[in-house]
Amino acid sequence: MNSSIQKRNMWADRIEEYRSSDLTATKWCESKGYKISRLRYWIHKFNKEKANSESTSNWAAVEVSSPVVYDVNPIKVTIGKASIEISSGFDSSVFEEVVRILSEKC
């Protein structure tokens, strides 16, 4: 395991230990001999990563007024992490709106 992963895991364990203690961050760091700035850095880093991972999974609602028709050979369009399959006879205005929404979100 490389050192950055080890350091990450070590700080994840330390943060869990700190949060389960009844101590303030300052007191906990003093008792362990850690710098408070390091603890705050890693808490901020993990919180930011969590927020970023949650925000990448947004869904956009699209209302389709016509019945869905399944085609043997649909066309697959990928925008960012999203994919759309369209079949013959699709509503081009709905498709344009979906592409616009996905382009903004992805």
Image (cartoon, helix red, strand yellow):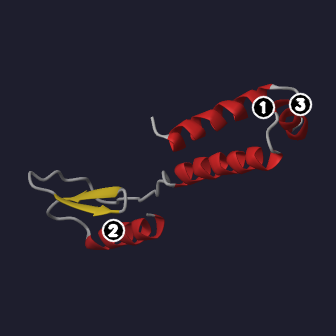
**In the image, is residue 81 above or below residue 35?**
below
Checking the image for residue 69, the label placed there is: none
Pointer 3 and pointer 1: residues touching (CB < 8 Å)?
yes
Label placed on residue 18: 1
Identify the residue shown where x is 87% and y is 30%.
31
Q: Which residue is mark 3?
A: 23
Circles 1 and 2: CB distance less than 8 Å? Answer: no
Q: Are marks 2 and 3 in contact (CB under 8 Å)?
A: no
Q: Percent x, y for residue 67?
A: 26, 54
Establish if 22 lies above or below 48: above
Tell me how far mark 1 sits from mark 2, CA to CA: 51 Å
Q: x, y percentage for residue 9?
A: 58, 35
Residue at the location (82% across, 26% down)?
A: 21
Q: Is residue 67 left or right of residue 56?
A: left
Q: Quadrant of the C terminus?
A: bottom left
In this rendering, position of residue 59 left or right of residue 65: right
User: Spatial distance from mark 2 to mark 3, Cα to Cα?
Assistant: 55 Å
Dividing the picture into quadrants, the one containing residue 100 is bottom left
41 vs 25: above or below: below
Q: Position of residue 76 (x, y in %)?
A: 21, 59
Amino acid on which the number 3 mark rests in the picture: Leu
N-terminal of the two: label 3 or label 1? 1
Q: What secondary structure is found at the residue carrying circle 3?
A: loop
Q: Quadrant of the N terminus?
A: top left
In the rendered image, residue 27, in percent from the top left (x then y), is placed at 90, 35
Q: Disc 3 and disc 1: Cα gap in Å?
A: 7 Å
Residue beneath label 2, please? 94
**SS at circle 1:** helix
Local secondary structure at mark 2? helix
Three-letter amino acid code at disc 2?
A: Val
Task: Please tell me which of labels 1 and 2 falls first in the chain.
Answer: 1
